[in-house]
Image (cartoon, rainbow, N blue to C red):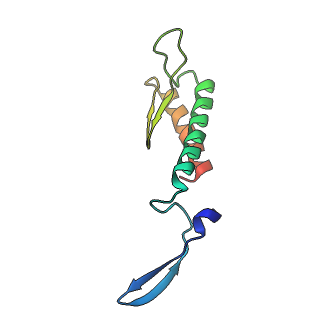
Amino acid sequence: MKCLTIATFKFNINGHSLGHVVPSRGLRQGDPLSPYLFLLYSEGLSSILKHSELAEDAFGLKIARTVPKISHLLFANDIILFCWSHIQACNAIKEALTQYQKISGQ
């Protein structure tokens, strides 16, 4: 968090400098640290989903007998999740996303 809270902001309203804001969460647009943190968080989410895939039989799909399961695909800031359409799979995905949310704060 130290990397994120180094910057401070003041507002200039009608020529007067007002307020003093120290960011407490998130990155500024264009921050050079942003792509690296995004990759780090994506790896964390991917790891949680892989762990859920191993624990739950309903999560992840095989497109052929001899290939590994596909549980998710990540591209840029999008994610596609693959599962069977029943309550066990939905609960497994919900648990994985809840765990990710608790860990990452997103």
> For the point 41% across and 84% down, which residue is it?
12
**Residue found farthest to the left:** 14
Relative to 96, does residue 20 appear above or below in the rendering?
below
* Quadrant of the frame with the N terminus: bottom right
User: Relative to 74, is 3 on the left or the right?
Assistant: right
Q: Which residue occupies the foreground of this view, 43 or 35?
A: 35
**Residue found farthest to the front:** 32
Q: Which x, y percent locates residue 7?
A: 55, 71
Q: Which x, y percent locates residue 37?
A: 57, 50
Q: Which image quadrant for residue 46?
A: top right
> For the point 53% across and 20% down, which residue is it?
69
Q: Which image quadrant for residue 79?
A: top left
**Residue found farthest to the top:** 65
Q: Which x, y percent locates residue 29?
A: 44, 60
Count of picture labels:
0
User: Relative to 43, is 18 on the left or the right?
Assistant: left
> For the point 51% across and 8% down, which residue is it?
65
Q: Which x, y percent locates residue 71?
A: 51, 27
Relative to 54, does residue 99 appear above or below in the rendering?
below
